[in-house]
Image (cartoon, helix red, strand yellow):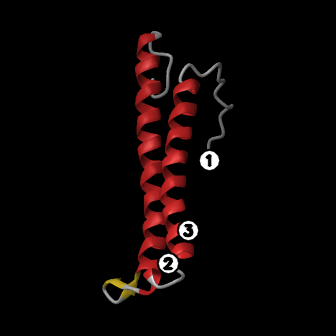
Amino acid sequence: MLHEPARSSGPDPASGYKTRLGVVMFIIYCLVYAGFVLTSVVAEGRAMQVIVFAGLNLAVVYGFGLIIFALVLALIYNHLCTRRERELGAAAGGKGAGA
């Protein structure tokens, strides 16, 4: 196994974009999660007991939905940040990610 020296990294011109995108996605996820919590609290368990899909109740479906939604958001975040790094790298003369 070949162990090369770590690639030197300088300032990240995309860090502002990554931060804003991460905060926006975090807020979106928090709102969806708050819907889960509010449904649990306000409906006092009645709504969460309703069978909604393949014999599974809303609590289970919503819970798995939250997990899948988080994974989808992570993939979208990775794709958008990688694309921005490449754009900025190309604009800076090919010194960005993937060059």
What residue is shown with label 2? Answer: 43
Q: Residue at x 43, y 59 (%)?
A: 69
Estimate the x, y position of residue 42 in percent, counting from the top left: 53, 73
Estimate the x, y position of residue 34 in percent, counting from the top left: 54, 60
Distance from Cα at disc 2 to Cα at disc 3: 10 Å
The amino acid type found where label 3 is placed reads: Val
Question: Crowding at label 2, few (<14), some or many (≥20) Cα neighbours within 10 Å?
Answer: few
Q: Residue at x 40, y 21 (%)?
A: 87
Q: Secondary structure at mark 3?
A: helix
> Could you tell me if the residues under marks 2 and 3 are in contact, i.e. CB atoms within 8 Å?
no
Name the residue nearer the viewer: 87 or 68: 68
Name the residue nearer the viewer: 30 or 46: 46
- Nearer the observer, disc 2 or disc 1? 2
Estimate the x, y position of residue 47 in percent, counting from the top left: 43, 80
The amino acid type found where label 2 is placed reads: Ala
Q: Residue at x 53, y 67 (%)?
A: 38
Distance from Cα at disc 1 to Cα at disc 3: 48 Å
Q: Quadrant of the C terminus?
A: top left
The amino acid type found where label 1 is placed reads: Met
Q: Secondary structure at mark 1?
A: loop
What residue is shown with label 1? Answer: 1
What residue is shown with label 3? Answer: 37
**Residue 59: assigned label:** none
Distance from Cα at disc 2 to Cα at disc 1: 57 Å
